[in-house]
Amino acid sequence: MDSLVWIAAAALFALVTHLAIAGYLYWKREELSSAPTPVRNREEKTAGKITCPACETENDSFYRYCRNCVADLSTTAVATRDGSRTGARG
């Protein structure tokens, strides 16, 4: 009988803890959902594409490594979609 009391007490404790955490998260939902998310600069996102010299895959201009073959895009001069050339980044 004594072990049954301990099991019931542990189950009650787990239930109360769960309800307390759920209530806290519900209460803080507005604050937690309005946290700022990191966003890249709009100009970087729309700047153009870089073609990988190794596999000729088009990558966004802010990529440092090719998304296909993982070649380093920051040290080689490659042509972009708009015809301009980009070189080593600082």
Image: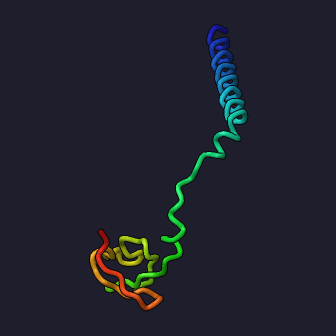
Residue 88 in percent (x, y) is at 29, 76
Residue 77 in percent (x, y) is at 30, 83
Q: Is residue 89 left or right of residue 43?
A: left
Query: In the picture shown, does residue 81 fall above or below 7?
Result: below
Q: Looking at the image, what colour scheme do you see? A: rainbow
Residue plotted at (33% across, 76% down): 73
Residue plotted at (72% across, 36% down): 26
Residue 52 in percent (x, y) is at 36, 83
User: Foreground residue, 21 or 57?
Assistant: 57
**Residue projecting furthest to the bottom:** 83
* Quadrant (top left, top right, bottom left, bottom right) of the N terminus: top right
Query: In the picture shown, does residue 64 fall above or below 77?
Result: above
Q: Is residue 3 left or right of residue 44?
A: right
Query: In the picture shown, does residue 60 fall above or below 33?
Result: below
Q: Quadrant of residue 56?
A: bottom left
Q: Quadrant of residue 72?
A: bottom left
* Quadrant (top left, top right, bottom left, bottom right) of the C terminus: bottom left
Residue plotted at (42% across, 86% down): 80
**Residue projecting furthest to the top:** 2
Residue 8 in percent (x, y) is at 68, 17
Residue plotted at (66% across, 39% down): 31
How many numbered discs?
0
User: Foreground residue, 66 or 20?
Assistant: 66
User: Foreground residue, 71 or 81?
Assistant: 81
Query: In the picture shown, does residue 18 fall above or below 51?
Result: above
